[in-house]
């Protein structure tokens, strides 16, 4: 028998309880010299925890890992099969389903999908009978697998997740990783490890991946905000120059759009892809030909860092900054 999904009210109660736990995770509140001071300090940290949850929803699912899932970098769900084949979606027309418990968030989810489809060849439509589709379902934070995994593919949407957070998760589902993990980041940002929560330093590690030869984008919708996984309310990431908008969730940047166009070969007509695959209607062949055409036509060699990885690694992403830069 399928386990019942939690209601939005149940999720909100869980979030409030989590705020209490975060008080202990972020800072020991019982350090005041007298009882009244301890109470005031506990309340201060409780309010800070609530603010953290509101402004960093893309980290919540890792901090409160959903049953049966392993997360990385806050909002990226890891696959059970560590040898999962890396893949982008086998089509540019992606089916979706919005679960009943997220019906009240339908407009936000549609707006998030429109952020991508308005400027690229990737589009979304309600599922009819397709085998592979995105399922938007309720959670505490925001999260997604990275890349195409096949079948019903969940995208998690919690109460704090705004439109930009949801778009961030959809980009993960399309195959994109966090911008701050690029290997060329040190020219642009500094990671302040002493401010990071214990055990969360792994979420700031650099990783190899495909950048398409595009420059590092500190204002990308896929970039961490300054307060992600902060143990003390101080920044965990700071820009090396006077750049505004790091961690923004207002919309896709021009570089975000270019990455989607590159990965999904938007300059190649769909019919040409089908002709070259020689197997119209076979999703595996279509997915393969997308990758091969991308590599042959678009990918300069030695453009390996970590912006897009057509990876089937399911990674849960907690929504970052509710549209704010989150710089304390």
Image (cartoon, grey):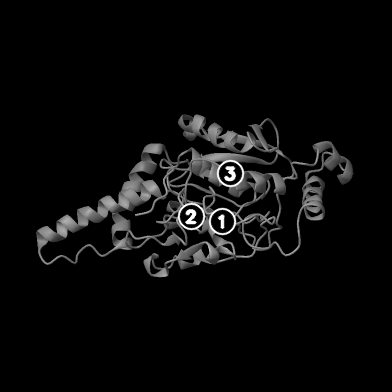
Q: Nearer the viewer, mark 2 or mark 3?
A: 2
Q: Is residue 54 left or right of residue 111?
A: left
- Residue behind mark 3: 170
Residue that lies at the very extreme toward the bottom in this rendered image:
194
Q: Quadrant of residue 27?
A: bottom left
Q: Quadrant of residue 34?
A: bottom left
Number of other residues with Cα within 10 Å of mark 2, as a class: few under 14, some 14 to 19, many 20 or more: many
Q: Nearer the viewer, mark 1 or mark 3?
A: 1
Tell me the distance, in whole angstroms, between the alpha carbons under discs 1 and 3.
15 Å
What percent of the width, then of the height, locates residue 213? 69, 57
Residue at position x 48%, y 55% in the image: 224
Query: Which of the two labelled residues, at mark 1 and mark 3, occupies the earlier sequence position?
Result: 3
- Mark 1–mark 2 CB contact (< 8 Å): yes
Judge whether residue 17 can be spotted in this image: no
Q: Quadrant of the C terminus?
A: bottom left
Q: Which mark is residue 86?
A: none
- Residue behind mark 1: 179
In the depicted structure, whether residue 88 falls above or below residue 116: below
Query: Which of the two labelled residues, at mark 1 and mark 2, occupies the earlier sequence position?
Result: 1
In the depicted structure, whether residue 75 falls above or below residue 164: below
């Amino acid at each position: 028998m399928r386990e019942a999904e939690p209601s939005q009210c149940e999720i909100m109660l869980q979030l409030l309880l989590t705020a209490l736990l975060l008080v202990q995770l972020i800072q020991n509140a019982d350090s005041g010299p007298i009882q009244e001071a301890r109470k005031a300090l506990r309340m201060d940290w409780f309010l800070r925890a609530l603010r953290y949850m509101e402004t960093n929803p893309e980290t919540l699912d890792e901090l409160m890992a959903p049953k049966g899932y392993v997360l990385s970098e806050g909002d990226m769900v890891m696959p059970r099969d560590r040898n999962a084949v890396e893949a982008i979606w086998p089509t540019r027309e992606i089916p979706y389903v919005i679960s009943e418990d997220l019906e009240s968030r339908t407009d936000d989810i549609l707006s998030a999908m429109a952020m991508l489809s308005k400027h690229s060849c990737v589009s979304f439509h309600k599922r009819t009978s397709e085998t592979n589709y995105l399922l938007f379902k309720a959670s505490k934070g925001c999260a997604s697998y990275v890349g195409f995994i096949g079948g019903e593919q969940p995208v998690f949407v919690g109460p704090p997740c705004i439109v930009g957070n949801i778009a961030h998760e959809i980009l993960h589902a399309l195959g994109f990783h966090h911008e701050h993990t690029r290997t060329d980041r040190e020219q642009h940002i500094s990671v302040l490890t002493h401010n990071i929560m214990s055990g969360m330093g792994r979420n700031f590690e650099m990783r190899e991946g495909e950048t398409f030869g595009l420059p590092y984008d500190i204002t990308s919708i896929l970039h961490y905000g300054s307060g992600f996984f902060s143990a003390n309310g101080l920044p965990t990431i700071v820009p090396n120059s006077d750049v505004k908008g790091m961690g923004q969730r207002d919309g896709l940047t021009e570089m975000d759009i270019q990455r989607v166009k590159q990965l999904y070969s938007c300059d190649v007509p769909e019919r040409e892809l089908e002709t070259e695959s020689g197997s119209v209607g076979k999703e595996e062949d279509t997915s393969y030909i997308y990758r091969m055409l991308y590599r042959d036509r678009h990918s300069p060699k030695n453009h390996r860092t970590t912006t897009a990885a057509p990876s089937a690694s399911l990674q849960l992403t907690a929504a970052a900054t509710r549209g704010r830069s989150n710089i304390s």
